[in-house]
Amino acid sequence: MSFFTDIGYLPLIMFINILAAMVIIFLERKDATSTWAWILVLFFIPLGGFILYLLLGRQLRKKHLFRWEGRKDIGIDNLISYQTESIRDDTFEFRIENAENYKEMIYMHLKTNNAVLTQDNHIDIFDDGADKFEQLLKDIEAAKDHIHVQYYIFRLDDLGTRIVNKLIKKAKQGVKVRILYDEMGSRNVKKRHFKELLNAGGEVEVFFPSILPLLNPRLNFRNHRKIVVIDGRIGYIGGFNVGDEYLGLQKKFGYWRDTHLRIEGSAVHPLQTRFLLDWNQASAQQKMGYSDRYFPAIPKKGDVGLQIVSSGPDSDWEQIKIGYLKLINMAKKYIYIQTPYFIPDVSFLDAIKIATLSGIDVRIMIPNKPDHMFVYWATYSYVGQLLRAGAKVYIYEKGFIHAKAIIIDDEASTVGTANLDVRSFSLNFEVNAFIYDSTISHQLAELFEKDIFDCTELTWEMYKNRPTLIKFKESISRLLTPIL
């Protein structure tokens, strides 16, 4: 007699399923779509569904995960209050072109995320992994005081070893080195692998580590951020993790197309604050307090305006998502979107449809090489809806496109770690730069237009005539989107 037909086990299985369903409905207070998706999983996969719920479904209970009293020391609280009030009263001095056109968005990010506007930045854009990591290694080599490194994925392959060896060298020179990585993203990496760096005076922490030696039951709530801060003067943010595949050296993906920013200017301070908050959450023994060394005076480096915006399950707001929505709603000419995963919620999908039906040139670029099969086919189903509305969809063929960027009207743009899916909107910890600058936005648009030459355009006719098997894969994947 099988496990599932043995009458002795059925009451227990049903009790577990009913209990889990009640938790989802009455205690977790998920949105209705996600609630129904989990209830279907529980009842169609009786025992396995409960295990999946334990791994993927639970909400993050602990509130105010990321607090840091040093905000007062560097005057962030006063600056936030000043910018919020002066923008509301129309007395704020916008010193950069176009920023005033986006004052509603700037105000929104201040209110929901304490994201101060900085107006004195210089940005270098990297769309190739070899170029990005070559510059990063140069900046590490030139570091004088500290190097803060945070990645979702940190592999100890050839690239990772090169970076670690450089960090060991700097630590031996007296530079303070800290590495923070996510345990799930870097699941093959352990703190003991950094023994030489630790012996040289470096520090290493793991985000949400497992309490079990071989299993981390927390598949959600991962720290997906990629941040590097060097001497409090240079910052990196974007899509590249650390690993040989990001140099295009993994046959499965081929060329890796991503977007990353190198920032000099006052925006490095909010990036530094973000790193310190994440570090202090992960570290039980080596918490960081305020120090002038981490927030040095920075001379004017340029005239790019930007805000560093974070989001995650520790907040009541989906800050990056509503920033995306605000950008889309403000577009008048065009919207360019690059994303490896396109699994939008209803609000995002409706915003794109409305923009397309209003005559705005909407173009979306997604990969042809899937790294998560269900996500890939769900993405395909959603872009099909947009094709019908008149959007243009491009399938990147050169390799794998991992860039997370939205550009509108050659005026404003955003680059960071957040994909266009439910996981990035509400389940993972993300960080994006929202940029108010014509030159940078135009450069990002030019990169998009150059990438089109490495794409196949997916037309509405092509999509309508797709095989039945693909339609079936899309339908199954679409049902699972609330929990992917």
Image: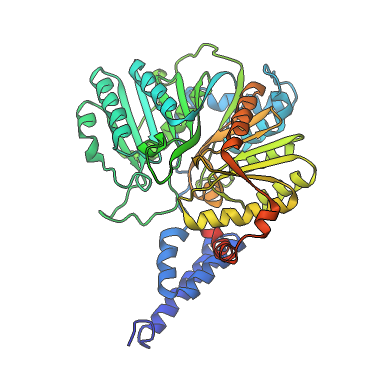
Residue at horizontal 23%, vertical 26%? 201
Total marks shown come to 0
Q: Position of residue 339 (x, y in %)?
A: 56, 43
Q: To which quarter of the image does residue 291 belong?
A: top left
Q: Would you place residue 437 above or below residue 112 in this image?
A: above
Q: Which of 232 and 478 is in front in this view?
A: 478
Point out the image quarter for the N terminus.
bottom left
Instruction: Specify whether 191 is left or right of 217.
Output: left
Q: Answer yes or no: is residue 92 visible.
A: yes
Q: In this view, does 480 lie to the left or right of 280?
A: right
User: Is 471 placed left or right of 141 in the picture?
Assistant: right
Point 75% across, 45% down: residue? 356
Q: Which residue is drawn at 25% across and 53% down?
A: 213
Could you tell me which residue is drawn at 49 percent across and 14 percent down? 298
Residue with the most extreme top position: 299
* In the image, residue 133 above or below residue 350: above
Task: Report x, y in % for residue 456.
Answer: 60, 44
Residue with the most extreme right position: 358
Looking at the image, can residue 243 be seen?
no
The quadrant holding residue 433 is top right
Residue 225 at x, y percent in the picture: 45, 38
Q: Which of 276 and 198 is in front in this view?
A: 198
- Colouring scheme applied when the structure was drawn: rainbow
The answer to whether residue 161 is left or right of residue 106 is left
Image coordinates of residue 182 in percent, x first then y, are 37, 43
